Image (tube, rainbow, N blue to C red):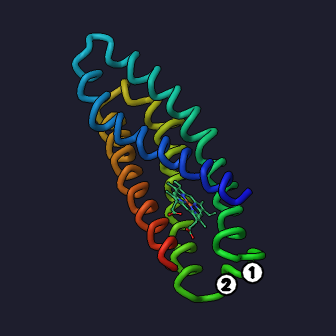
Amino acid sequence: MKELILLIHIIVASFWIGGMLFMAIVLSPYVRKLPTSVEAFQEVGKRYSFWGTVIGLPILFITGIFNSHFIGGLNSIGDLFQSYPYVNTLKLKLLFFFITVVIAVSHDFYFGQRAHINKKYKNITRVLGITNLIIGILIIYLAVKLRFGG
Ligand code: HEM
């Protein structure tokens, strides 16, 4: 059971980070050159936002809670108030996770949907996207730290 849950967690994490890297490095530079770039960005954004933000992030949270129990040995929320390397790293990971959720929601459902209106919205959308990519990589680093005990 714990293997299956970690497998799902890692597949969804790969999709989340991989999707952002793919967008930033492969897709965006190409789409930007298209005459229909506005529509293309809106369409791709809508799909990635559905699978990544609406479906992916809640799955990461739920499977993450199970990982915390099955792998990290935590039994209740109260255990988060303790202080030892594993739980401290997990708390930092959770903090970054909540920041990611706030950024993803504002990126996908507010700024991203207005990015075609003017340069200000477009730049904010881009900065939020890049920030979330960086935070995502930090979260992976914290996951690696957890693997080695925190
Ligand atoms: C963007 C969100 C997240 C990403 C990208 C992510 C990524 C990962 C990855 C790649 C692993 C595998 C590391 C390994 O076992 O070697 C992992 C494990 C884990 N994740 Fe997450 N995660 C995310 C969110 C969460 C959340 C919200 C929680 C807690 C509620 C969580 C808790 C855990 C735990 C406890 C492990 C097992 C660590 C261990 O090996 O002891 N994750 N995560």
Look at the picture and state if 118 lies above or below 33: below
What is the x, y in percent for residue 41?
39, 23
138 lies left or right of 35: right
Question: Residue 58: percent from the left, percent from the top?
Answer: 65, 48
Image coordinates of residue 77 in percent, x first then y, are: 74, 75
Classify residue 52 as left or right of residue 27.
Answer: right
**On residue 78, which mark appears?**
1
Q: Residue at x 44, y 37 (%)?
A: 111
Neighbor class of circle 1 (other Cα within 10 Å; few <14, some 14-19, many 20+) is few
Query: Secondary structure under badge 1?
Result: helix
Label 2: element kind: helix
Q: Is residue 32 left or right of residue 73?
A: left
- Quadrant of the rendering where the N terminus is positioned: bottom right
> What residue is disc 2 on?
81
49 displayed left or right of 66: left
Residue 118: percent from left, percent from top: 32, 28
Q: Quadrant of residue 27?
A: top left
